[in-house]
Image: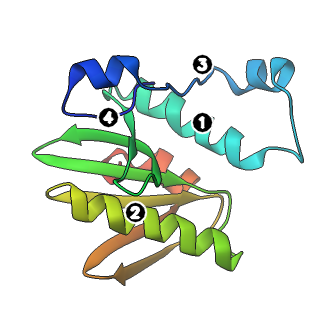
Amino acid sequence: MYKYDYSLKKQFVSNKKIFTIDNGIRNKVALMFSGDKGKFLENLVFIELKRRKKDIYFYKTARNLEIDFLYYEAGKYCLIQVSYGLDDVKTRKREIKAMVEAANELPDTKNIILTYDEEDDIVKDNVTIKILPVWKWLLDPING
């Protein structure tokens, strides 16, 4: 998957993210550390976005914070972060900070953080972020 940039040249020469089309294949061939639940969840979201025929990218903010998925639809950028959980204060802060920074850099964004089982709506620095469990997002194509 390419990094999003207005310049096609920069897209092609930048680092890419690699996903598998099946979590079972990933499970069999990938080096795994501590279960990798978050990576499996991220790969699941990638598979679903491809199934929904989205042109997806990842995004790096000016301060090098990463957004897992970005696509453009219906006149809006959709930003999606994937995190197994947001219980850890550092993880929550990191995911929200990246989302707020990206939303401020791009015009008119829809902001979603997908987790294993958490649900919430938060507003940080005038940016509204919807936190959804992945299962709910998978069942409702309007949310993503």
Q: Residue at the location (37% across, 70% down)?
A: 129
Which residue corresponds to mark 2? Answer: 99
Among the two numbered marks 1 and 3 on one chain, the one whose residue lies closer to the N terminus: 3
Q: Which residue is mark 3?
A: 21
Q: Give the amino acid at mark 4.
A: Tyr
Q: Which residue is mark 4?
A: 4
Nearer the observer: mark 4 or 3; the answer is 4
Gap between marks 4 and 1, in whole Å? 20 Å
Label 4 and label 3: CA atoms lie apart by 21 Å
* Circle nearer the N terminus (4, 2): 4
The earlier-in-sequence mark between 2 and 1 is 1
Disc 4, SS: loop
Q: Helix, strand or loop at disc 1?
A: helix
Q: Between residues 10 and 118, which one lies in front from this camera angle? A: 10
Circle 4/circle 3 CB separation < 8 Å: no
Mark 3 residue type: Ile
Indicate the position of residue 25 as horizontal and vertical percent values: 76, 18
- Mark toward the start of the polypeptide (3 vs 2): 3
Give the residue pinned by disc 1: 44
SS at badge 3: loop
Residue that appears at 48% across and 60% down: 113
Q: Quadrant of the N terminus?
A: top left
The reply to whether discs 2 and 1 touch (Cβ–Cβ < 8 Å) is no
Point out residue 2 in the picture as x, y percentages from the top left corner: 40, 25
Question: Relative to residue 14, is residue 69 depicted above or below?
Answer: below
